[in-house]
Amino acid sequence: MLEAFQAALQTPGLFWLLVTIGAAGLVRGFTGFGTAMIFVPVGAQFLPSADVVFLMVLMGVFSTITLFPQAWSKADRAEVGALSMAATVTVPAGLWIMSQMDPLTLRWVAAGVIGVTLAAVISGWRWQGRLGWPGRFAIGGAAGVVGGMTGLTGPVIIVFYLANVRDVARVRANTIVFLAALDVVIAVNLIFGGMASLKAFILAALLGVPYVITTLTGKALFDPKLEKLYRFASYSVIGLAVLSSLPVFD
């Protein structure tokens, strides 16, 4: 235990990981998403892929504690339930792909997923139709694969929800509840699959302190009337995280 704690304190880039998770907490607090899209590009530069994924799901647990109760009361539980069931089936496939790919390739994949997500949302693309149960299962399944493979649990669901013309409070609540369920599914698979290290757990505890503080701060700042400001700030932070972490700059 002591050795694992010392190893966590000696993690390369720990300062940048702390700064990044603090920024991610602010964004997550006032938008309901963005933690992985900000942290994964930076974390992947310093940590093994499995540790990055495990850290992200544990951070999800920390943020869930502060955001879930209020979100649960506003969420469309039937829709979130369908998304979650599909993700439960596909998460193992995503984790298997992650275990087979080299870290550099995963960094490019993560950057690509985030870049496409950001471009789709910023472009103003809108889905005008209605998705039935097959569509919901497809979206949930895709989120499970991408989340297990890269730790990016949010991008698929973000494109689905934020690209729709919907009530911002309901979208935020659905996103929070679904990401909470997906975090639990991935964590269980990592633990029982032997891919969750003690060092990563301790590192998550260290990062969890600034993350919870900034998530609560972001939550306190949330105001539906300032939606455009929140989105601009979130997109800017996400874009900066992706650009600064591209392997081409190593």
Image (tube, grey):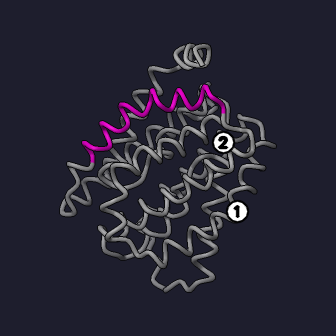
Specify the amino acid type for callout 2.
Trp
Q: Is residue 35 placed above or below 159 in the rendered structure?
A: above
Residue 108, label in figure: 2
Q: In the rendering, which numbered label is found on residue 221?
A: none
Residue drawn 51% across the image and 56% down it: 154
Magenta extent: 197-218
Where residue 39 appears, as percent x and y from the top left, is 49, 38
Could you tell me residue 13's position as x and y percent? 52, 20
Residue 52 shown in magenta: no
Q: Residue at x 49, y 21 (%)?
A: 14
**Picture coordinates of residue 25, whole percent (x, y):** 37, 41
Compared with 24, 76 (above or below) is below
Q: Specify the farthest residue to the front.
A: 1
Q: Which residue is mark 1?
A: 90
How far separated are the C-alphas under marks 1 and 2? 21 Å
Give the left or right position of residue 159, taking residue 209 as reference. right
Is 210 a magenta residue? yes
- Quadrant of the image containing the N terminus: top right
What element does badge 1 sit on? helix
Residue 83 figure quarter? bottom right
Marks 1 and 2 in Cβ contact (< 8 Å): no
Please determine whether, in this image, residue 41 is positioned above or below residue 14.
below
Query: Residue drawn at (33%, 55%), measured in percent from left and top?
Result: 31
